Amino acid sequence: MSHPRSLVDEIAKAVGWNREFRPELDWSTVERGLGTPLPSDYKELLSRFPEGLFRDSVRVDNPAQSEDTWATFRRNLDELLEILGDEDLEYLEDVDYHLFPEPGGLLPWGTDVQGGTFCWITDSASPDEWRIAYHNQGTNEWREHPGPMTKVILEVLANTGDDNILHWNLNDTPVDFRTDYTA
């Protein structure tokens, strides 16, 4: 696996990100609140970027950004886990996934702009080995990626056509990062 810092450097270069950002919360607070350690690439990315949208496609919220974003993150995470687990909605029907905090359960880390969800598959004691599961809301399909999550984002930023986990043609979509965060 590539070093987390090098992948985050590649993402920052691809989107031209050179702004200063420092999360208000430390990661141990977030991990304690979630009841699990988190992948180092995720923490590295969100220690450098506030919450925002990559290439008008992938949204990542930052639980360490502030007390307010942590509270919103927890509320949204609980709601998303409830929705994914709703048997009437059948998100997990015909797939061998279950939800966090069950061992090996899906733990959401991001969304796409069409209602899709990116999750870690928490099936390893080492969070840096967690694979990625992506649910495409439009097709109701799950796809997997070996990870890490920064590699998924980098592929969305760097690849042309629909050669990405989303299977969206992004040729006409600017390679950028947008955020409402102001220091």
Image: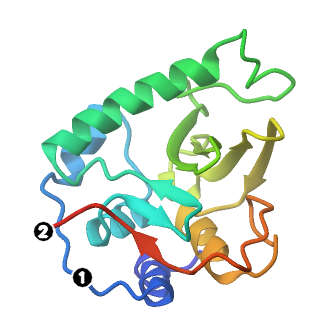
- The secondary element bearing badge 1 is classed as loop
Q: Is residue 72 left or right of residue 125?
A: left
Vertical order, 160 against 57 (above or below):
below
Residue 107: percent from the left, percent from the top? 52, 37
Vertical order, 90 against 130 (above or below):
above
Residue 181 falls in image quadrant: bottom left
Residue 71: percent from the left, percent from the top? 23, 34
> Decide: marks 2, 1 in contact (CB < 8 A)?
yes
Q: Residue at x 80, y 35 (%)?
A: 140
- In the rendered image, the quadrant that contains the C terminus is bottom left
Q: Nearer the viewer, residue 125 or 179?
A: 179
| Residue, disc 2 | 183
Instruction: Give the residue at the far front of this rendering.
Output: 172
- Which of the marked residues, 2 or 1, is nearer the chain's N terminus? 1
Q: Nearer the viewer, residue 14 or 33?
A: 14
Q: Is residue 127 left or right of residue 47?
A: right
| The disc label shown at residue 19, or none | 1
Q: Nearer the viewer, residue 181 or 81?
A: 181
Q: Amino acid at mark 2?
A: Ala
